[in-house]
Amino acid sequence: NAGVTQTPKFQVLKTGQSMTLQCAQDMNHEYMSWYRQDPGMGLRLIHYSVGAGITDQGEVPNGYNVSRSTTEDFPLRLLSAAPSQTSVYFCASSFNGVGSKVYEQYFGPGTRLTVT
Amino acid sequence: RKEVEQDPGPFNVPEGATVAFNCTYSNSASQSFFWYRQDCRKEPKLLMSVYSSGNEDGRFTAQLNRASQYISLLIRDSKLSDSATYLCVVTLRGDYGQNFVFGPGTRLSVLP
């Protein structure tokens, strides 16, 4: 198993450019999510999905779009990059618990994005 | 107020020391609790789940006090390899599933 993979590892964008961060998992997990990590802020949830065709917003969704057409893939799109989106982006996946059951989230290695 | 708050750190301790991390959470609807570990410039990885009865995994002990909305992590006999940032995590139910809410982390450096 490759686990959770993310591409690219590093990216530099100019303000106003768009791009897609890729995330894939091979563990047949229903739940996938995107976080951003900024110094002193911890990881903050951007968007999440519990299966193909089902996505929802997290704490900081503005400026980002997601879609989930397959179980394996959950891309994150930056529509018009801004310097405030400079961050480290992590994708994570897990089984989706029923009721109060919660499963461990597995994280990808991260994408370091700089917007100039 | 942040949903999850942790000791600001960093903690610098000698090898063999015992170190305790504290975490508080603001939402009483939080359902599950974890400690994750994050090495420098790496992804977070699960260290241990936290249960109301308290739980131990080798040198690591986690405690949860739901009434006080407080979580702790104790590391005994610190090793150099314990140097990392420790993230306190609670879960809150979203519209479709349980979402993880992370604290800002506390950095630990174990010194030789």
Image: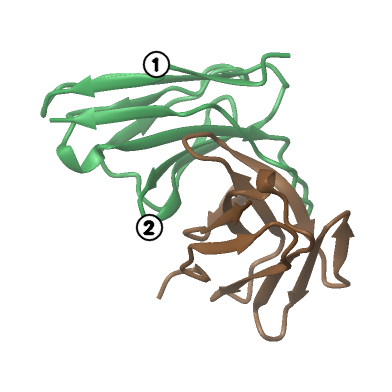
Figure colour of chain B:
brown
Graded by Cα atoms within 10 Å as few (under 14), some (14 to 19) or many (20 or more), the crowding at tag 1 reads some
Residue A40's tag is 2
The tag earlier along the polypeptide, 1 or 2, is 1
Q: Which element carries disc 1, helix, strand or loop? A: loop
Q: Is residue A112 left or right of residue A97?
A: left
Q: Residue furthest front?
A: B112
Q: How many numbered circles does the render carry?
A: 2
Q: Position of residue A28 (x, y in %)?
A: 72, 22
Graded by Cα atoms within 10 Å as few (under 14), some (14 to 19) or many (20 or more), the crowding at tag 2 reads few
Q: Chain ID for label 2? A: A
Q: Position of residue B1 (x, y in %)?
A: 40, 76
Depth check: give the residue in front, A86 or A101: A86
Figure colour of chain A:
green
Q: Quadrant of the C terminus of chain A?
A: top left
Residue B45's tag is none
Depth check: give the residue in front, A61 or A23: A23
Q: Chain ID for label 1? A: A
Q: Which element carries disc 2, helix, strand or loop? A: loop
Residue A8's tag is 1
Q: Amino acid at mark 2?
A: Gly
